[in-house]
Each structure stands twice: as structure tokens, then as C-alpha cells.
Amino acid sequence: MKKAGIIMVIGSLLLLGLFKFPLWNIMLGAPQYPEPLGMNIYIQGIKGVQEFDLQNIDGLNHYIGMKTIPKPEEMWEFSVFPKVIIGMVILGGIIGVMGFFEKISYKYFLGWFALMSVLGVLGMYDFNNWLIDYGSNLDPHAIIKVTNPDGTPMSYKPPLIGYQKLLNFDVDSWPHIGGYLMFVGMALTLVAFWLGRKASLKPTTQ
Amino acid sequence: MKNILKSTLAIVAVFAAFTSCNNSGKSNNSGALSSNNAEKVYVAPGEHDSHYAFISGGYSGNLTVYGLPSGRMFKEIPVFSQFPTNGYGYSEETKPMLETSYGFVPWDDSHHPDISQTNGKLDGRWVFINGNNTPRIARISLTTFETEEIIEVPNSAGNHSSSFITENTEYVVAGTRFSVPIPQEDISIKDYKGNFKGALSFISVDPEHGHMDIKFQVLMPGFNYDLSHPGRGKSHGWFFFTTYNTEEANSLLEVNASQNDKDFIAAINWKKIEEYVNNGGGTMMPANYAHNIHSDATHTATSTIKKEVRVVNPSDVPGAVYLLPTPKSPHGCDVDPSGEYIVGNGKLSANLTVHSFTKMLAAIEAEKFAGEAYGIPILNFEDVLAGVVEQPGLGPLHTEFDGKGNAYTTFFISSEVVKWKLDTWEVVDRKPTYYSVGHLTIPGGNSAEPFGKYMFAMNKITKDRYLPTGPEMEHSAQLYDISGEKMELLLDFPTHGEPHYAAAIPAEIVKNNSRKIFKLTENEHPRKALSDAETKIVRDGKNVHVYMTMIRSHFSPDNIEGVKVGDKVFFHVTNLEQDFDVPHGFAMIGARNAELLIAPGQTRTLTWEPERVGVWPFYCTDFCSALHQEMQGYVRVSPADSNIELSWSLGE
């Protein structure tokens, strides 16, 4: 159970990587952009991969009437997400330490994982809603208007995850280092749960 | 009759045998070679060349940038000549670059580029190049690939033995081809001998910014100073100049300057003169020369006139200057990578003369002099001679080195490049050039560390090498693979203007420093506009200043009224883009200058003097975006006495 507690603490601490590394990354390549433009999505806000990428993405998007990429203060998520992550790190740390001293059951580890997963899914849902709005809530006076074959306006929503072709752009949307650290951390809490369970089963089999 | 017929048939048969033999031999060879060689110069679409070559434009006054081994031209950098393609020398910001003590000189003859060095190795920071006609030296940045600085060289005329740099870029050196009265005066040309002097200028280079300043000029006897190169390694601290017309003739030089059996290579111990000057030596003489600097912060050039220059009489600095007898009007003056050998390419000589730096020092030490010229000791030819390359070809001009103990010399008259060995002086290989080669270049071939893979020869005569284009043709160059024992011709490529020398460098030393944009946040142009809110029009008497911005795909403002006939309109246009390779152009109908091509983050100014009442358009000249054709605007021009107020707008 000691080992499980340590892994639980490490797992939750890995979430702190989100403060240093991007959660997600969207790259936009095109014939004119052999070096693709890109945005890194941090829990505190969106930054360009290169210094002027956001400005250049906004510059291109104005042709099709997309809104500019939001500043941190323009979305509540960027102030709430950091607090949620800090909360989960503290909670995971406490659970891990208490597990280490065998004050609580290993089942709390799974509980933390379940809570984090629910929050994660909610976060993804919220992120996807923003992408939908960003890609389809277009300025009616846009210079270029592209419609689907059925006459509805085309959506420029980037994929939540994976690759998609949007007009001349090849869009790739994938987790980034912060996101991977979070997934590894969450997986470690599952490992902690499994180790804890193994440790608690041992005495009964003996 | 029968006999004649028989013998004719026999001859024909013999010829046929010969020719068919030749043909089959040739086609086999070239067939195998050409496919092989095609691969060697093939740079697949989207791939990069391995080397940059900076090729002088000669009478274009500019510098062209090529890739090796493909021979593709990437850019023409305007240096000494107005360049309507981007407005260099036409825009208010760049006009000062072409100011001289003679006023605005919009053209020159650019000859010898040289890349900056650190410890004798190419460092790829700057290219220097000389303007031959109105003596000037320019410094081109290898981050912006633009001309940053031009300094005029006073007391000089025909700035030909230039612009070569010392092994740590301490100095860029500019020698005069024509000797002239110093200071200039109204005397008979017949009084040339003994009265005219040749100024060799040592221009210091600031190690951080590259800014140039004439440290001193050595006033040499009235010879013609043809070419020069720095000592390196053991001979660092010396500079070598070839001379011709040591006869000091002032007319019909082709005969009168070809009389002496030997002219000289002048060896200058610049370290010694530098020390002399640092201790207050030399005299400041009144002069008049321009110094022009372009700033990437203000995007503006300034021109200042300097009023004096320090001159040094060589006889005042004992041990600083010696003359090495060298046969027959030597042209190129080339120093091998070790700094030991100084090659004098005696252009009227059948042999190549190589001097030894070590022997020269020993002769000086032993004070074995053959005489003196105007107080300058002349050494004995035999005492300084390292060796002679016997009868290598006709009309030797220039030599470069591969760093593997070989030298490559061009021969103008026999139109070939000859490879020979240092130390043994034996000829190893020769390959024809097409035709009449001048200079040749090996990347780093005049540094301590050449990159001996490619060599290219720049020819003066093109004739039938390409599809004909009327009486005037571009010159031709040939690229050779010199990695093996024998040189191999790989490629023919046309060059722009009249290339003299070129400097080449491995791409990786330069390419990562190339700038993509200028940052708007660093733009300090006094009349910039960084946003719509900062655009405005200000009238100052007859002068109307338009603070304008451009971004895909509009100008702001794009409707301007209140301009009158007789006004002078200054369009100060800032490109708001911060994206790589999105310049915008600006062209105004009837403007009697050129367009502006403005890089992202840059501000440039075009002047327009409207002469006709009406409504006149301007537009973007660079197809910048899908809505490029919409990137346009109008200026309303009213009669001189109208009272329409200035107004401007966008999207109203």
C-alpha cells in the first residue's frame, strides 16, 4: 500500500505539467504555409506556436468571418480550469499520502480517477462546444462564404482530435505534452488503485 | 585519275575510322558522365542547395545570390544601383545609401565580394563588395540580405584591389587601380610620373555592428594596384597587392605599361602601420567622402559627409612596406590557406610566380635589397621565389585553393582552369571553360579553411552557350566537381550583369540566420503607423504626409481627398503583416520614380508630385492574397487654389 500511495501522489502531481506545457495543440498547414501555423491550448489560455501565429490565423480567418481567437480574459474556462487542476492535484496528493499511511482505502484512488474523468469529459465537451461556435458562428458579412452541397454554411470547426481538411488547410488537433502528462498521471492513479487492491487482497489469501 | 580516286577513298576511309572512333568514344564517355553529373547538380523540387554563392553583378552594381550545385539564382541584392524592383534608391529611406561626395550616384561597377571571417574561417555575418567606378565599399547583412552600409573611399580612383578582408574582419581593404594626384589638383596629365599616388585604404570594421571607418590610407607610388589578398595564419598582419604600370605611364598603357619585365607585389605590414597610427602616426588630410548607414530599427538610411582622412607615407614607417618583383603585369594576388604562398598571376607571363612568405621575411631580416622605389625597399626576385609553375597556360588571372594542397588558376587567353600542386608546382589537370574565364570561386577558397568540393568559373564571353538573345547576352559560368583528382564539369549556368569575383559558403553557416520579418514592435520609423488608429494625413505647407498602413487586403486610408496640384505627397506606408514572405507593393499612377516593395513590419516612403486634377488610383503590386486585386485606393487631386480640406477614410 505504501508503493500505491507514492504512485498516487506522483500521478496527481503530473497534472502540474499542465501549467507549463500545452494541454492540446492545433496545427494548420496549407500550400502557402509549409511551416504550419499553430496554436497551443494551455489551461490558462491560447498561445501561438510561433510568435505571430495567432495574429496570422486571425488575419486569415477574417476572410471567412471567424471570430478572433479568444484572449484568456474572454473565456471563463481559462480562470476556472487552473483552479480545478490545482484542486485535483491537492486532493490526489492528500489521498495518496493518507493511502501511504493506510488511513484510507485504496478505493479512494479509483474515486479520484472517476472524478477526474468526469471533469475531463466535461472539459472536452466544453472545449468542443467552443470549437463548434468558433467554426460556425460566422460574421454574416464575411468576404468569402462557402456553403455545403445542401446550401447550409460550411463550418470551419477544427476536429476535437485527429486530422481534417478545411478548405486549403490541413488541420491536425492532438493532445500536447501537458495533456499526455495528465493522461499518464491519471493512468498512474489507476495503477495505484490496482497495487492498493493487490496489497489489500494479499492478507486474505494468506 | 584512278590513283587519285583510290588515295582519296583511302583518306576518307581513314578519316571515317578516326571520326567514328572519336564519336563512339565521346558518346560513351559523355553518356555515362552526363547522367552521373545530372545527379550531382540535381536539387529536387523543394530541396535546398548545399551552398550559397554571392556573385558580383559587375556593371549591374549589385550582388546576386545563387545556390550551388544547382546554379539557380535566388535574389538580386541592390547595392550600388537603383533598383526599381523594390524601390531601393527611389524610396526616401534608401536614397541616402547612394549619396556620395559627388552627390547622388545611382550606379556603380561592383567587383569583388568577400565574406566576413573569424580566425581565418568564413563566419557568414556579412558580405563586403567594392564599387569600382565611384570608389565605395558596401557591407551587406546576411541576416536581411540587404545592403546596410556604404562608405566612399577618398583619394581613390578605380577601386579595384578591393574589397578583401583580414582574417578576423579587422579591416576591409580597398586599393586604388588608378593613381591620381593626392590631393586632387589641376596639373598636366604628363606630370603623372612621380606626382601621382596610389592610395591603399584600410577600413576598420566594428566587430559587433560591422560599421566601417577608414583607419588609414597608405599613399603608395603612382602604380596601378590591381588586386590584393590578406595574409593569413603565419602571414596574418600582412596584405599583398599586385601592381602593374610600374612604368608610371599615363597614356597607351597597353604598350607603355607592359615594358617592364617585372612589376611588383607590394607587401604591406598593416599591423606595423596600425601600431604607428595608434601612436599618433600619419597625418589627417582634408577629404570629402560619404558614409551611409541603413538602420533596421528606423528602416531609414542616413548619409553623413566626412571631412578628413588619415594618410600614411610608407617611407615614414620603416619595415612596413616591401616590393616583391613579379613578372609581367600580375593581375590576381592570391594567398594559400596556410598563408605561406603568395601567387602572382602575371597576366602577360607564360609562367605562374609563387612567392614564399618565409623567404620574404628572411630576405627582409638579411636586408638583401635590390634597390628601392620612392623609399620603399625592393627585394630580390630569386630571394622571395618559392617556385614557378612552368607554362601552365596563357593569360593567368586568378588562383583559388581547395585546402588539400592544390591550387586552381584561371587562364583567360587559353580559356581554361588549371589545377596544380603547391610545393611541387606540377600541373595535375586542366579543363576548358566557355569562354575566357575571369575569376573562379571555391567556397572559402580564399580563407584558411576552404570547402574543396565545388569550383565555378565565371566567364567573360558567352557566344553559343545558350539560346541566343540578340547581341547582348548574360555571361556564363561553369560549375566543376573538384572532389577528385581530376576536375569534372558539372553545369553551365548564366549569371547576371558581369560577374567578376564571387564568394561562396556552406548554406548551414548562413541559412538559419536569415530573417523572416521585421517586428512591428521594433519599428522606430518616425512616420510609421502601426494600426488604423495611427493613420493620418498631415499638411505642412505644400508637403502632404500620408501615414498609411497595408495588410491583406487593403490600404488604410484608401480614399484621400484635399490633395492639390503642386503638392508634394509623401506616402509613408507601413506593412502591418507579421507573416513570412508577405510583402506588399505600393504604386501610384504617374509617380516619376518607382514602386515600393515593403517587407512585413517595414515602413517605406514614396514621393509623388501630382500634376493633374482628377481622381488617381494607387494599388498593391505584389499579388499578396486572394483579394489582391481589391487592394487599391484613390487620391482626389484638386486645383491648386481649391479649398477642399484634407480628409481620408477606409470602408465608409
Image (cartoon, coloured by chain):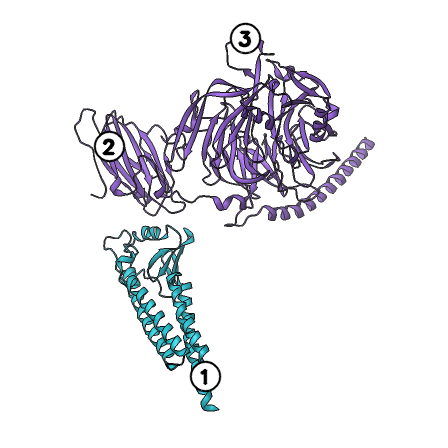
Chain colours: A cyan, B purple
Question: Which x, y percent locates residue B496?
Answer: 52, 34
Corner quadrant of residue B262: top right
Identify the residue position indicated by label 2 in the image.
Answer: B538
Corner quadrant of residue A36: bottom left
Question: Which x, y percent locates residue B17?
Answer: 76, 40
Name the side, left or right, on which A108 lies relative to B313.
Answer: left
Question: Which x, y percent locates residue A148?
Answer: 30, 61
At label 3, the amino acid type is Ser
Badge 1: residue crowd in 10 Å (few <14, some 14–19, many ≥20): some
Identify the residue position indicated by label 1 in the image.
Answer: A199
Which of the marked residues, 2 or 3, is nearer the chain's N terminus?
3
Find the distance from the CA under tag 2 to the CA under tag 3.
Answer: 56 Å
Identify the residue position indicated by label 3 in the image.
Answer: B188
Q: Helix, strand or loop at disc 2?
A: strand
Residue B82 in view (yes/no): no
At x 59% / y 30%, what residue is drawn? B461
